Image (cartoon, helix red, strand yellow):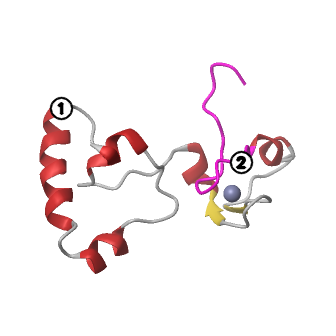
């Protein structure tokens, strides 16, 4: 699959290319990871979702700064903050550490 986006489970990163390769006449809307059991929407595998206002998903320097402030402010309301973060969101460890 060189040159193509890697199709991976949103939670554990297990390769989903085999499941996609088994599709013949139609593709399902929902899927389940055979490794960790997470139920997901295939659209989230093909186009990983972004959380607007969350620093890990910012694009560009200005948005990164603005969303960084917004994310920092959000952590003071942990129930609301963690209510917005979903398992389907891709983890970007480097950005989260900053
Ligand atoms: Zn998985």
In the drawing, does residue 23 fall left or right of residue 36? Answer: right
Image: 15 above or below 40: above
Q: How crowded is mark 1: few (under 14 residues within 10 Å), some or many (20 or more)?
A: few
Q: What element carries label 2?
A: loop
Q: Does the magenta stretch include residue 5?
A: yes
Of the image marks 1 and 2, the number of the one nearer the N terminus: 2
Ligand 1 within 8 A of label 2's CB? yes
Q: Is residue 83 magenta?
A: no
Q: Tell me which image quadrant ligand 1 sits in.
A: bottom right
| Towards the viewer: 39 or 24 | 39
- State the image coordinates of residue 75 (x, y, percent, origin top left): 22, 67
Main structural element of the magenta stretch: helix, strand or loop? Answer: loop
Residue drawn at (39%, 65%), measured in percent from left and top? 85
- State the image coordinates of residue 17 (x, y, percent, origin top left): 76, 40
| Towards the viewer: 80 or 95 | 95
Give the residues drawn in magenta, as a range: 1-16
In the drawing, does residue 69 fall left or right of residue 50? Answer: left
Residue located beneath label 2 in the image: 14
Marker disc for residue 45: none
- State the image coordinates of residue 87 (x, y, percent, origin top left): 51, 63
Identity of the residue furthest to the top in this view = 3
Residue drawn at (63%, 19%), measured in percent from left and top? 3
Image: 12 above or below 24: below
Image: 6 above or below 15: above
Residue located beneath label 1 in the image: 61
- State the image coordinates of residue 62 (x, y, percent, origin top left): 13, 35
Quadrant, the C terminus: top left
Residue drawn at (18%, 49%), measured in percent from left and top? 68
Residue drawn at (27%, 54%), measured in percent from left and top? 54
Q: Is residue 31 something that shows in the picture?
A: yes
């Amino acid at each position: 699959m060189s040159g193509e986006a890697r199709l991976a489970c949103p939670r554990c990163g297990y390769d989903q290319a085999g499941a996609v390769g088994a599709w013949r006449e139609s593709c399902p809307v929902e899927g389940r990871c055979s490794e960790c059991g997470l139920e997901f929407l295939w659209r989230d595998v093909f186009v990983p979702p972004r959380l607007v206002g969350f620093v890990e998903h910012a694009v560009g320097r200005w948005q990164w700064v603005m969303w960084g402030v917004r994310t920092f402010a959000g952590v003071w309301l942990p129930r609301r903050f963690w209510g917005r973060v979903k398992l389907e969101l891709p983890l970007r460890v480097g950005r989260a550490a900053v």
